[in-house]
Image (cartoon, grey):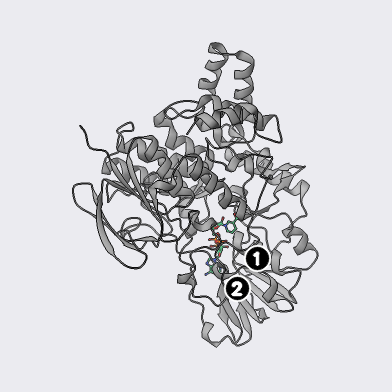
Amino acid sequence: MTEKIRIAVVGAGISGLAAVKECVAAGFEVEAFDSRDEIGGAWAYQHCTPDATPSEVWSSMYQGTMLNSCRDTSSFSDFPLDPARYSDYFKHPLMLQYLNEYADHFDLRKHVRLRTKVLECTARGDGSWTVRIQEDGGRVQDKVFNAVFACTGHLSTPMVPEFKGRETFKGQFFHSHCYRTPGPFEGKRVAIIGFGSSAVDIACEIAPQAKELHMVTRRGGWVLPRYVLGKPTEAWDNRATQLWVPSSLSQWLQTKLLQLVDIPPPKELVPEHKLLEQNPTVRGDFTEKVATGLIAVQRASVDSFTETGLALSTGASLDVDIVICATGYNLFDIPYLPSDLVRNESTPQNAVDLYKLLMSPRYTNVFLLGFAEVIGPLPPTVEAQARHAVGILGGRIKRPSQDQMIRHIKKFHEFQAKHFVDSPRHSIATHAIAYNDDLLEPLGAVPTFGRLLTKVFTSNPIKAMKVLNAVWFGIPSSAQWRLCGEGKKEPLARATVLRIAAEERELSRSEREFLVTTT
Ligand SMILES: NC(=O)C1=CN([C@@H]2O[C@H](COP(=O)(O)OP(=O)(O)OC[C@H]3O[C@@H](n4cnc5c(N)ncnc54)[C@H](OP(=O)(O)O)[C@@H]3O)[C@@H](O)[C@H]2O)C=CC1
């Protein structure tokens, strides 16, 4: 009898749960470890105050966090979000609820060891790994696995730049990681450094109550509303425009659409890069708050801190009571993995040595899930990463040689330099549909036009045409990656794709029936 492949999954959030599920489906033996006492990872809200020690805060979720991608694109591919219970966009407790429902539906909890921290993973030289775990801060134990799936995300270690004179500032200073509610900022003068999703969300929450709210951004950026002409913004994008229309043309069209429907941003905000060359921020009330003067924007770098605030590169200075540093995260601080796994001394600046943002050419049998900055929703992508990794371990996908990986990575660096802004977070940026397709094509699981057209001639033609239309010209739902190939769940996926296209307000009867029978 052949021995089962044994997998260690580190983290039980979105990526970890998807990894466990795919490993179990492939017949692997899997143990997941999470230091917290509940599943959900970053989506499991943790209360803290701005003066908390950042290393003791494991979730950056604030009370107002709401999904940036919409329900119909953001579910796992074989576990649809029910419109009757989940609105187009929803707040973080509902995402945690969904992850719990996913874990229960696929019976994943029995594979997860909570309150168990992974201290270190060491390559053993034969492709296997020793994983050192600690239970409840007590007993330390070494366990051997055939492979490690690192699923702890890239939002654990706040990045605080070295600002000149920061110690001289007499006001309050903290990282957005420890922000939770706007209450403490009532009547205060606040400056926020950075212009990512955290900065824009926090600015919009605080601005109505603060005395002054300033944002300091060195690059500017695009901010998309959640809705355009009554539909979720993603409904204006689809597989055909992403894959057939040259990206410069589709970005131009989308920018024009944005200009037509939204208040024009002030010139300080308009960036030099195009719409999809950064991970866009999503916030419907931001431009209005800028236009009405609730938020003041400074296009500048921080030269230094002063006793009373910030001195900016433009020569302006800001006197404030509080500075919030919303400058993102040390993306590849993965303390339990070898330090040269992702980058070493020869890696170019703002780049990573990861094949398909998933595997290191320097180590075998370790897969990084959820470390991509996806321009699109995360769940379908981590699932595609898990399916690809499982495909390699199970022998269904040919494992690339080290040379092949290195060549691929070099091309990837060139692609990133051409298509994304030059910044650490965009070293791992990727467009969802093309990236998911790339991971799933070796499994035959991409709903290509040809594959779906063939169905028109080999099955119910009207239904097959509707599916083709929905997948190529409709909102990019994740169920599309379960229509064909290895791991397909065609009846359920077809029902989901058609229900979303029909804009039904609840799961269809077929979906409910298939969900009872598919785990
Ligand atoms: N609702 C949701 O779903 C939310 C999702 N998120 C996600 O969490 C992740 C982290 O987001 P966020 O915390 O905003 O971090 P980001 O890394 O996305 O943004 C960091 C910002 O800080 C700026 N910055 C970095 N270093 C400096 C510096 N030295 N001086 C001035 N500015 C600096 C960056 O500017 P530059 O571009 O110039 O480098 C950028 O504007 C993202 O994936 C985001 O999508 C976050 C909040 C809400």
Please provide percent x and percent y for residue 470.
63, 28
Please provide percent x and percent y for residue 402.
27, 44
Q: What is the distance, in whole Å, between disc 2 and disc 1 at their CAs?
A: 9 Å
Residue 362 in view: yes
Q: Toward the viewer: 204 or 506? A: 506
Q: Residues within 10 Å of mark 1 (few under 14, many from 20)?
A: many
Q: Which residue is mark 2?
A: 324
Tell whether 138 sits left or right of 175. left
> To which quarter of the image does residue 139 belong?
bottom left
Ligand 1 location (quadrant): bottom right
| SS category of the residue bearing label 2 | strand
Q: Which residue is mark 1?
A: 202
Residue furthest toward the right?
Answer: 292
128 w.r.t. 323: above or below: above
| SS category of the residue bearing label 1 | helix
Question: Which is more N-terminal, label 1 or label 2?
Answer: 1
Residue appearing at x 37%, y 49% in the figure: 354
Q: Toward the viewer: 159 or 117? A: 117
Which quadrant is the N terminus positioned in?
top left
Label 2 near ligand 1 (CB < 8 Å): no
Q: Are marks 2 and 1 in contact (CB under 8 Å)?
A: yes
- Residue 394 has which mark? none
231 w.r.t. 10: above or below: above
Tell whether 190 sits left or right of 162. right
Q: How many marks?
A: 2
Amino acid at dot 1: Ile
> To which quarter of the image does residue 390 belong?
top left
Tell whether 477 sits left or right of 441. right
496 w.r.t. 278: above or below: above
Residue appearing at x 41%, y 57% in the figure: 114
Amino acid at dot 2: Ile
